[in-house]
Amino acid sequence: MSSSASNSQLLSSCPIQRGGVVWQKLPLSPQEGFLLSRIDGRTPVSLLGHMTGLAIDAVMASLVRLVELQAIDWQAGAELRRTAQEAVATAAATPSAASDPRLDEPCDLTRDEKLELLQFEDTLAKANHWQLLGLTGDPSSSAIKRAYFSQSRRFHPDRFFGRNTGSFGARLDTIFMALKTAYAVLSNEEQRRAYAAHTPAKKDR
């Protein structure tokens, strides 16, 4: 399997906590424990970073550690589990967005803030409205509103008010507009039904 195919397989794979594991007793770092608490068997790797605020490299490293501790498995068949495990290990050991030369652009953003914006921007072309807000199943209006406010706090331009954001300012505007569009559609009952008819949210398990 090619590297790009493996990475795609990984990003769409859903890790799940292993049954019978008392993860509170495992020697986890705060970051690993936080990530594990968000692993539910239905959230793909591509969204875990957005949900936790962790850079994808940090997610990869934590997943490798959780696999080593036998705290997680994959919601898939044996072949897909093997592919996902191999992709996690490869991605964790391979330079990714963290080596992007755009991270060296002089501005008032930290490297982690730049990385977060670049990674989320990369999801815009392939993520639907549900995925952008981190929603699954049949969320209520209040759940949709909470999800939007959670994401908008991360990417609202006012968060960076008064700082020189350089070219990242345009990326921030693009991301925030995508979130606003997703919320506008999903918060309107009629538009949400029409959107769900051709692009349903991923089902809860």
Image: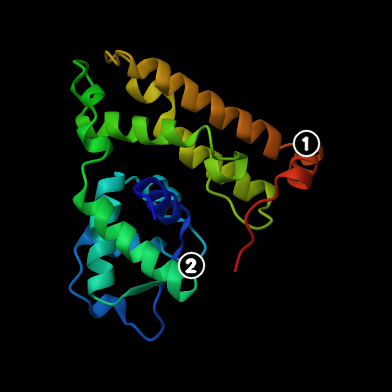
| Image quadrant assignment for residue 179 | top right
Secondary structure found at label 2: loop
Q: Amino acid at mark 1?
A: Gln
Q: Quadrant of the C terminus?
A: bottom right
Does 19 sit left or right of 99 as displayed?
right
Q: Residue at x 31, y 75 (%)?
A: 71
User: What residue do we see at 42% from left, 50% from top?
Assistant: 5
Residue 188 place in picture, x, y as percent? 74, 36
Residue 104, position in %: x, y? 18, 22
Q: Is residue 42 visible?
A: yes
The quarter of the rendered structure image containing the N terminus is: bottom left
User: Taking 20 as reference, is 192 left or right?
Assistant: right
Q: Amino acid at mark 2?
A: Gly
Q: Which residue is mark 1?
A: 191
Q: Nearer the viewer, residue 43 or 22?
A: 43
- On residue 41, the disc is 2
Question: Relative to residue 90, is residue 53 drawn left or right?
Answer: right
Q: Is residue 107 above or below residue 145?
A: above
- Label placed on residue 145: none
Question: Which mark's residue is nearer the viewer, 1 or 2?
Answer: 2
Please state the horizontal and vertical placement of residue 29, each as a whole percent of the image.
19, 63
Seen from this angle, which residue lies furthest bottom?
Answer: 20
Question: Helix, strand or loop at disc 1?
Answer: helix
